[in-house]
Amino acid sequence: MMLFPSRQALRGLLVLLFTTAGALPARGQLASEPTFDLELADIYADFQPDKYIADVICVLYLTCNGSDPVMLRCQGNIHRLEVIGRNQQNLSWVYRPPYIHLDNLEAGQREVELHFRVRHDGYSPGGGTIATNLLDLGAGVFWYPRQNASDPHQVILNLETPADYEVSTNGTLQRDLPNNTRRIRTWIVSKPVAEGITLKTP
């Protein structure tokens, strides 16, 4: 015989859940609207398509109020993550895939630098592919850290790849130079867009 809880018991359980949720730290909440302003992402990325890997250095220029949670979404199989407050000492952060929580970011204009290696093989968390025959880093992949909620921002991307690796983006190409046996290209997204910069096979 299966027993079902009474309405009164269910009401009590809901009250308990809401009370407990209110006591949780801010990092447990996902924002549906921006809680800070991402103005610019300045990215250097070194792609190794034969290994499905990108080594990324990303500097984010943020404006926040010092009270709302600052949570960055970054997907893929991430290794060796480091987060540095460039104009704030002792920045506290926690990585809970796929979110990077900046716990004590002070109010005002802040610069946060992130270093990480990420694998995008089409099967890793968050999807996305960096392969010799396919590049698929669309708006939904969050291949570099940005806000979970819609937050239009500018992007500068310096991308290093094998010399013959073709890339199509929504940015404007500023330079395309040989770099030993490799190739470095710079794209700029000058008009802020919520999806940031997207990369795909031509």
Image (spheres, rainbow, N blue to C red):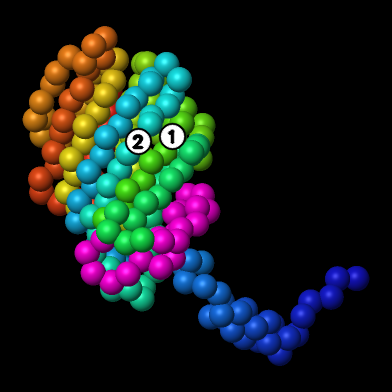
Measure the C-alpha gap from mark 2 to mark 1: 6 Å
Q: Quadrant of residue 91?
A: bottom left
The amino acid type found where label 1 is placed reads Arg
Q: Is residue 80 left or right of residue 177?
A: right
User: Which residue lies under the disc numbered 1?
Assistant: 117
Q: Is residue 20 above or below residue 195?
A: below
Q: Is residue 61 above or below residue 115?
A: below
Do callouts 2 and 1 mark residues in contact (Cβ within 8 Å)? Answer: yes
**Residue 149 visible somewhere in the drawing:** no
> Is 140 colored magenta in this rendering?
no
Q: Nearer the viewer, residue 197 or 64?
A: 64
Q: x%, y% of residue 163?
A: 24, 12
Q: Is residue 14 left or right of residue 124?
A: right
Tag of residue 10: none
The amino acid type found where label 2 is placed reads Val
Pointer 2: residues within 10 angstroms few (<14), some, or many (20+)? many
Work out which residue is located at the far front of the displayed protein and give it. Answer: 89
Q: x%, y% of residue 9?
A: 73, 86
**Quadrant location of the C terminus in the rendered image:** top left
Pointer 1: residues within 10 angstroms few (<14), some, or many (20+)? some
Q: Which is nearer the N-term, disc 2 or disc 1?
A: 2
Q: Is residue 105 above or below residue 158?
A: below
**Quadrant location of the N terminus in the rendered image:** bottom right
- The residue at the point 44 percent across, 54 percent down is 100
Q: Nearer the viewer, residue 84 or 27?
A: 84
How many discs appear?
Answer: 2
Q: x%, y% of residue 144?
A: 34, 43
Q: Is residue 181 above or below residue 172?
A: above
Magenta region? 90-110
User: Which residue lies under the disc numbered 2?
Assistant: 56
**Could you tell me which secondary element the residue under label 2 belongs to?**
strand
